[in-house]
Amino acid sequence: MKYYFLSTGRSGSTFIYKIFHDFYPIINLTHQGFGSRLINISSNIPLPNKISRFILKLLFQIFKKDSIPPSTVDPLQSYAISKIIDRNNLDNDQIKIVHLVRNPISFVTSFMNWKNSSFKRLFLHSFVPFWQLNPRNDDVNTQLKDNKKFKQFCKIWTHKNMLFYNKFNNHINYNILKIEDLTTSNNSSEIFNEIINFFKLSKIEFDYDQYSKTKINKSSGNKFPDYEFWTDDMKSYLNEVCGDLMKIFGYK
């Protein structure tokens, strides 16, 4: 059985990895392993689908020893996996996909702080070609022409989440999961158990509520303002780019 958590990054993948590593090591869930960075870059290069799939399968064979990726929560592999796996792969009940999402307001804020939290991250986001997907669509608000990274992260949230959702939605082996439901809702432990049932794993007793209170992989620096301090143009831009999908996911 293969288990995939697909996400945009900065959506709680480290929390997911830790909890499954500690309590469900049997599924051998990986997170940002060897070769993931090159797989990420290759998946973001705009190539014809057949060529892109061929290259990605080859890279998975080289780095992961399998053209079908191992079970993972690695966001650096998510876009690549979404290109390799299609709905037909889910029909044999040997693959389970959890689409992990985060409110775009906190996602963008987190990523803006994350990219500036170390020299390595700043270098990757600023100077490495195709480190991030750069969706090409018309600017919604020209007043934000000098805030390219903010706009890019808004577009990435919509583009990747829309792709995951449109490709796998309504399949019996696909499940969408808001990270906030696992970390801040009043019934977070019940929602976690729903994922365990979805994976057809045995329930393990532990203090989930206490476990979920621990902050993991938190963005440092916190120089980017919280939403209440965003300009009207920033709020309007995010709403225009992300608003329709936010409604689908229950964020509005």
Image: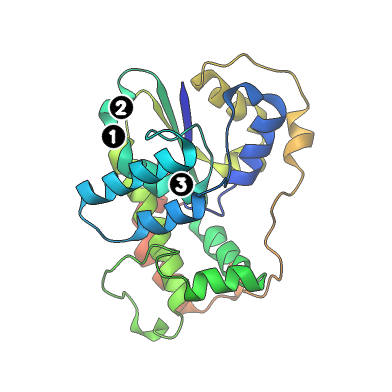
- Residue name at image x 67 percent, y 69 percent: 117
- Confirm or deny contact between disc 2 and disc 1 (CB under 8 A): yes
Q: Earlier in the sequence, mark 2 or mark 3?
A: 3
Task: Estimate how packed mark 2 is, as few (under 14), some (14 to 19) or many (20 or more) residues with alpha carbons within 10 Å.
Answer: few
Marks 2 and 1, how far apart at CA? 6 Å
- Residue name at image x 42 percent, y 59 percent: 41
- Residue name at image x 62 percent, y 38 percent: 16
**Please, what is the three-letter code of the amino acid marked with disc 3?**
Gln
**Please, what is the three-letter code of the amino acid marked with disc 1?**
Asp
Q: Is residue 164 depicted above or below 48 in this figure?
A: above
Q: Is residue 83 depicted above or below 228 in this figure?
A: above
Circle 1 residue: 86
Front residue (pair 193, 120): 120
- Residue name at image x 52 percent, y 50 percent: 102
Q: Secondary structure at mark 1?
A: loop
Give coordinates of residue 204: x percent, y percent: 70, 18
Q: Secondary structure at mark 3?
A: helix
Give coordinates of residue 1: x percent, y percent: 46, 20
Give coordinates of residue 164: x percent, y percent: 36, 43
Circle 3 residue: 77
